[in-house]
Image (cartoon, helix red, strand yellow):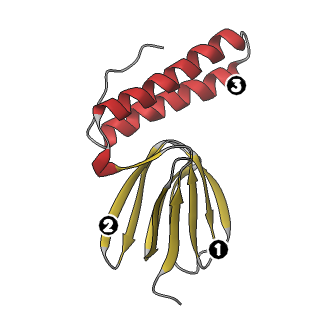
Amino acid sequence: MADTMQFDLVSPERRLASMQVTAVQIPGADGDMTAMPDHAPTITTLRPGVLRVEGPEGTAEYVVTGGFAEISSEGVSVLAERAVSKGDMTHEHLDEMIAEAKAMYTTAKEGFVNEPGPVDDAAKLLSDMVAMGDEIGLSSKQPSL
């Protein structure tokens, strides 16, 4: 069993991380999961949350808003819709993310009348964004649905 594995985190804007790690805690859409060296091959979608990486050089945390993670025995590759180092997150970042989620929810309500699936998905995204803010200590006002 290997001690470390390769971890890569990429967003549309840039590569945020590429390093050897011992574990990656992933905010999966179906629940949180931890990937370690020799993990079974898996692909999961991400929900808004904090991605934690543990390695020989310590722990790093990144705020992600969605995307997916590909896990193999050799490593983890995360392709995030948006990713920011937790230390770089500000109220402005959070407010912008929540505003985008609220706009998606409003659009879904207007475009999918009497079709709860897409509206429910957009409401969950908005709720996850607010919960993520609480988790990282940047609470925002609860938007009214």
Hey, what amino acid is under mark 3? Answer: Gly
Q: Earlier in the sequence, mark 1 or mark 3?
A: 1
Residue lying at the far front in this picture: please name it: 13
**Nearer to us in this view, 21 or 11:** 11
For the residue carrying disc 3, how many other residues have a C-alpha within 10 Å: few (<14), some (14-19), or many (20+)? few
Mark 2 and mark 1: Cα distance apart in space: 23 Å
Tell me where residue 32 appears, x and y as whole percent: 50, 54
- Look at the picture and state if 68 lies above or below 96: below
Residue at image location 49% in from the left, 27% down from the top? 126
Q: Tell me the residue that label 2 is attached to.
A: 59
Hey, what amino acid is under mark 2? Answer: Thr
**Nearer to us in this view, 24 or 120:** 24
The reply to whether residue 109 is in sight is yes
Q: Tell me the residue that label 1 is attached to.
A: 40
Tell me where residue 70 appears, x and y as whole percent: 63, 63
Hey, what amino acid is under mark 1? Answer: Ala
Residue at image location 32% in from the left, 30% down from the top? 92
Depth-wise, is mark 2 or mark 1 nearer the camera?
Answer: 2
Residue at image location 67% in from the left, 60% down from the top? 43
Secondary structure under the numbered disc 2 in the rendered image: strand
Residue lying at the far bottom in this picture: please name it: 1
**Nearer to us in this view, 79 or 118:** 79
Tell me where residue 18 appears, x and y as whole percent: 47, 69
Q: Tell me the residue that label 3 is attached to.
A: 117
Depth-wise, is mark 3 or mark 2 nearer the camera?
Answer: 2
Mark 3 and mark 2: Cα distance apart in space: 37 Å
Residue at image location 44% in from the left, 71% down from the top? 23
